[in-house]
Amino acid sequence: MPKTVILDAQTTNPGDLSWEWLKEYGELEIYPRTPKELIAKRCESADIVITNKTPLEKSDLEKMPSLKFVAVLATGYNVVDTAYLKEKNIPVSNIPSYSTQAVAQLVFAHITEHYNAVALHSQDVKNGGWSSCPDFCYQLTSLTELYGKTIGIIGFGKIGQAVADIAEAYKMNILAVSGHETDQSGRKNFKWATLDELARESDIISLHCPLTKETENLINADFLSKMKQNAILINTARGAAVDEQALADALNSGKIAGAGVDVLSTEPPKADNPLLSAKNCTITPHIAWAAYETRERLMGILKNNIKAFFDGNPINVVNK
């Protein structure tokens, strides 16, 4: 009977979804999380290993003689040594295009928090600020409209384009940088730009690029020095695309007005991460993908990946 092992079930399914369907394919072992030293032991008799962020390196994979298939519970699959598994003719499948709308939604949650200061005003009202105010309304900080502002989008794949769709609804101007420029003639107020143009002209910059050698620390001190002083930076892509110390310095010195990040270079972050104490920086704990509907969609794609493997025709294979 085939055996499936889930190494880190907690983040994908904290209890509001079901893994029961996997029992149709044989024995099932579920672990909320797995430390590095237990990976090989837990998977030594597994035919199928399912992982989200638990790494599957060659040193551990070599100790899994029964392994026939790896399913990654994410779009990114850099946690798996896909090259080694390709040599062994073991397919690795990922979960493509499941979180596009959810990530775009969180981008604007960070943007509107900076522009409308909802949490700041709500807490002040609860602390008695409105009750003691002589006027019918008040502002603790300057509030800003999105209408007419320019958003610069770095990386214009499905998520970047979904962000542009929302920006269009706000009647914003859109600049974009991409390694592959597609026809966007149907968009209003859209322009392809160079990275320097985007840095100089954008009121908001949102990252949606993959992490590569070219994009690591793409947002560095030089880039930040070119941004408008009232501009904000949003990162829901990869933490390492941003030089975090340079961003903290820019925030603390007032070089830029704010930042909103859902990803950091190390997750969970170290206590001394400079962004944890930076001014005007909102941080969410990598939750852009974590809405119930989004995880339900992920689970549906996983079901298709598993079924396709057992049918002898794996899909969404990343190491062909």
Image (tube, helix red, strand yellow):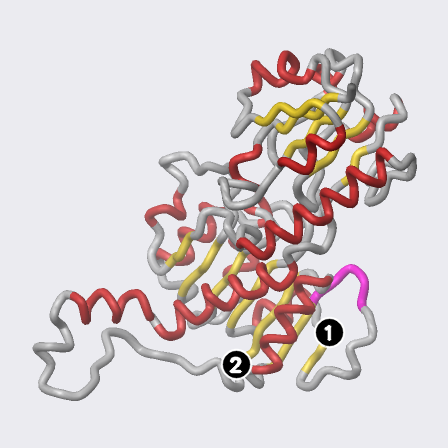
- The quadrant in which the C terminus is found is top right
Whole-percent x, y for residue 209 in the image: 67, 55
Span colored in magenta? 177-181
Q: Is residue 69 left or right of residue 112?
A: right
Residue 234 vertical position relative to residue 304 in the rendered view, above or below? below
Pointer 1 or 2: first along the chain: 2
Secondary element at tag 2: loop
Secondary element at tag 1: strand
**Kind of residue at disc 2:** Lys
The answer to which image quadrant residue 92 occupies is: top right
Whole-percent x, y for residue 86 in the image: 87, 28
Residue at image mark 1 = 192
Residue 49 vertical position relative to residue 154 in the rendered view, above or below? above
**Kind of residue at disc 1:** Trp
- The quadrant in which the N terminus is found is top right
Please name the residue shown 69% across and 34% down the image.
22
Residue at image mark 2 = 149
